[in-house]
Every structure is written in C-alpha cells, then in structure tokens.
Image: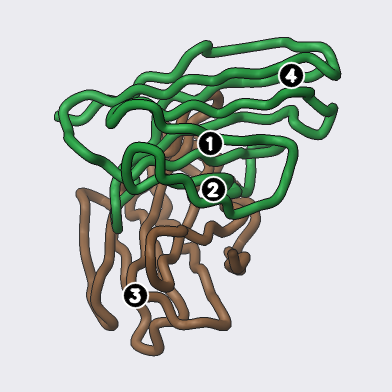
Chain colours: A green, B brown
Amino acid sequence: SQTIHQWPATLVQPVGSPLSLECTVEGTSNPNLYWYRQAAGRGLQLLFYSVGIGQISSEVPQNLSASRPQDRQFILSSKKLLLSDSGFYLCALGAYEQYFGPGTRLTVT
Amino acid sequence: GQQLNQSPQSMFIQEGEDVSMNCTSSSIFNTWLWYKQDPGEGPVLLIALYKAGELTSNGRLTAQFGITRKDSFLNISASIPSDVGIYFCAGLPSGYALNFGKGTSLLVTP
C-alpha cells in the first residue's frame, strides 16, 4: 500500500530564515506529487505539483519553491520565510484520487 | 483554482441523526471527492465520484455526483461521535489540480 511520510511534523522558524520540508512516498512508482497549504484549519490551497523527476508546476506565485530530486521525494523550500507562510503543509500523491500525508505544522515567528 | 461553495459551514447534531452537506461550483467537474479531516491530521479520502448521477456508498456515508456536474452531496446516516471532524469536498475540472471547498465542521453530541 502507498505511504506518505512528511517531516518534520512541526516547525517553528523566525521570519527571514530558510525552509525545507520533505515528503517521501513508499509503495508506488512515478507518482504525481502535490504540496498543499492549509490555513486556520480550512481551505486547502494547491501550491505545486509534479508529474515526474524535475518537473514542477506552480499554481500560486509566492515565496516558496518546490523540487523533486528523486522519483519518490518532493521538497518544499523557501529562502526567506514570511509571517504569512505559517500554516499546515500537506503532501499528497495520486491522480484523480489524491491521498494526503500527515502534514507539517509551520509557525513563522 | 476555483473555490467551491460548500454548505453548511458547520453543523451541531445529536448522535443518531442523519447529516447532509453539499458543494456547488459554477464550473463543470469531471471528478468529485469527499474528504474528512481530524484535527492536526491530513485529510482522508472518503468517497470518489467519476460520473454524473453516480451514487456511491461507503458504510454509513453516501455521496452523489450531481447531474449538472456542478454539484455534489454527502450524506451521513445515524451519526456517531467519531464522525466529528471537518468534511471537505473537492472537484477536478481537468488535469490534476483539485479545487477544494472551505469545509463543513461537524460536531456530534451524545
């Protein structure tokens, strides 16, 4: 069965610091991978998706970037965090049916 | 992506009652999905719908893909305390970018 791992589970970072969130998946090959952000417990917003290694589509212009260095690894990064980057970040995989990981709670102070 | 209109925003019901919630869009979707999210966790897929008019059940949950392809409904029968959570609808117009509703928060009192 497919499994999604995300780390860290929680993160507190100061404004202006860099960010790296990692998502790895097991039990599948060449999956479509996604990064979503959820603010205040509601409303998932798609940030990036990837259909293969090195292929990234950005849905929302912002302070974040994504990379897919390996087939089952998806990374969300920022060079300088803003207060507005706080939220719950979710990695997902799938095509028409998307399955979510456990999430990373990011608080920017 | 387009924001879906999901209602009601919240529901407070007694254990044993049935629940209905719906989601509407101004655009046509090819796929409708319903998710449940518990606090601090990722959403869990409950039901996926692929065809206009389709009615699909998963235990006490039943969801329908609207005939116009612009709406979907989720019903929960005989609610129990563990049904508490936030329910999200999501629609897929084309490609892979899901559009989500803002969620329905369900509270069940014993």
Q: CA gap, disc 2 to disc 4? A: 33 Å
Q: Are marks 2 and 1 on the same chain?
A: yes
Between discs 2 and 1, the one toward the N terminus: 2
Q: CA gap, disc 3 to disc 1? A: 36 Å
Give residue A19's position: percent from left, percent from top.
66, 18
Q: For numbered disc 4, what is the local secondary structure?
A: strand
Along the viewing direction, whichever of A1 and B106 lies nearer the viewer: A1
Give residue A58's position: percent from left, percent from top.
57, 50
Residue corresponding to mark 4: A107
Amino acid at circle 3? Asn
Q: Is residue A11 visible?
A: yes
Q: For numbered disc 3, what is the local secondary structure?
A: loop
Which dot marks residue B109?
Answer: 1
Along the viewing direction, whichever of A92 and B15 lies nearer the viewer: A92
Residue corresponding to mark 3: B30
Q: Is residue A12 left or right of residue A94?
A: right
